[in-house]
Image (cartoon, rainbow, N blue to C red):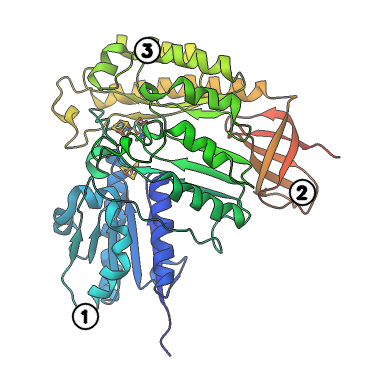
Amino acid sequence: MNQAKRYYIATFGCQMNERDSEIMGQLLQESSYSATEVMEQADLIVVNTCSVREKAEQKAYSLLGRLKKLKEKNSALVIAVAGCVAQQDGQRLLNRIPHADLVIGPQKIYDLPTLLLGQKGCKTPEVRTGLSPAFAIPAFLPDVTSGSQFKRFVTIMQGCDNFCTYCVVPYTRGREISRTPGDIVAEVAHLAAAGITEVTLLGQNVNSYGLDKATGAETSDLTHFPDLLRAVAAVAGIQRLRFTTSHPKDLSEALMRCFAEIDTLCPHLHLPVQSGSNRLLKLMNRKYTVEDYLDKIARLRGIRPDIAITTDLIVGFPGETDEDFQATMALLEEVRYHGAFSFKYSDRPPARAIAFADKVAEEIKNDRLARLQKRQEEITLEWNRAYVGRTLAVMVEGCGRTTGEQWSGRAPTNHMVNFAGPSGLRPGQIIMVTISEGGPHSLRGSAVMA
Ligand code: SAH
Ligand code: SF4
Ligand code: F3S
């Protein structure tokens, strides 16, 4: 009897890539492949890549380079490259990685099983990287028998129309395409029916959900994001709702009000600011000023005082002066983010900033990044300590490392909480925890005994 073929998927990049890897895994299982955790045992290796920063791309190429040895040992091994590097480099990728068999862009992942059939006996690599603004994201019900049994990601849109001048995503994921509310609600209902209680709605810019310009979908049956949130919140069984990512320019009053009006919407917003300098925001094509941004934060906190706000920041964007950088440091003090991801600018062709003058030297970027991260770590710690004495509803995720009575889970604000609790808790259960300690990366406490 033929043994089922085994697949291994390595995923880099954002949550959208993680969701795409789940979809590819499910498609493979439906075509009688089975998953393996050991790359060396796989008959098919899928590398789902990210190219948002130079480092991310290097990581993907470095793994792909190492796969050459496995291919030499086993010529039947199929190597597929998916994700944003695949889309960006297409045919060129084969010059660097001649041992790859398939190069598939983000809109082509659903073709994976068919492409694999085509691979049988044929040793010519296939490149599928079409990006069409008319692409319709297929209705596809997730497999609920494997993977997390309590929280899931649901992609609500693909692509981005914003063309921030540093960013490759509009080129790798194409124009914004929204799924229909009907498909999204059906997917969430399917998850809820299987006992999943937390969903995170995903898109590069969820605030412009339903406003797809390329297809004119605004005039079709698509609703806007606040309506979609309400529709998803109405699905019975969903206890926690989250979404990511939001562009500040599109953060509407109607969306802010959702944080007060939808009980299950968690009080956490990731609102990438990128820079605290108006001059740089303009060069970045972000379409808001620091003043607009601060005004939105103030209104949001007025509506939902306990909201945790996190952000993304770039240091060393071309032309960034000491003064610009100081403006970013001042913004940290002004907003006091609960947390921030910060990155050194890197050129991402064909994004426009590659041609911008006054590139910042690497040592200066390193120095600015270190200063920014140090200050943000202090602010994060101050926030975390401020939770001491409060009792939070924590969704159990798993067992802690030490004993059976040490648990970990997430607060509504998305803080990781480690806590002492009774034995026999199950993942997904919500339990009240009194916080006794705030550390740099997590909170610690004890379950409130009934
Ligand atoms: N769609 C999201 C984020 C996409 S990429 C948004 O609009 O906010 C995630 C983060 O990577 C960005 O927020 C930005 O901070 C960072 N990033 C993107 N391109 C970059 C580049 N060329 N160099 C450094 N950081 C970059
Ligand atoms: Fe990139 Fe800007 Fe789109 Fe975010 S909004 S994905 S940073 S172009
Ligand atoms: Fe990376 Fe593509 Fe996501 S570039 S961040 S995998 S959209």
Q: Residue at x 29, y 56 (%)?
A: 82
In which quarter of the view is residue 280 placed? top left
The image shows residue 19, relative to residue 274, as above or below, that is: below
- Asked if labels 2 and 3 touch by Cβ distance under 8 angstroms, the answer is no
| Residue bearing mark 2 | 405
| Residue bearing mark 1 | 121
- Asked if labels 3 and 1 touch by Cβ distance under 8 angstroms, the answer is no
Residue 56 in view in this figure: yes
Secondary structure at numbered mark 1: loop
The image shows residue 188, relative to residue 25, as above or below, that is: above
From the image, state whether disc 3 or disc 2 is nearer to you.
3
Secondary structure at numbered mark 2: loop
Q: Earlier in the sequence, mark 1 or mark 3?
A: 1
| Residue bearing mark 3 | 290
* Cα–Cα span, label 1 and label 3: 58 Å
| Left or right placement of residue 282 versus residue 124 in this view | right
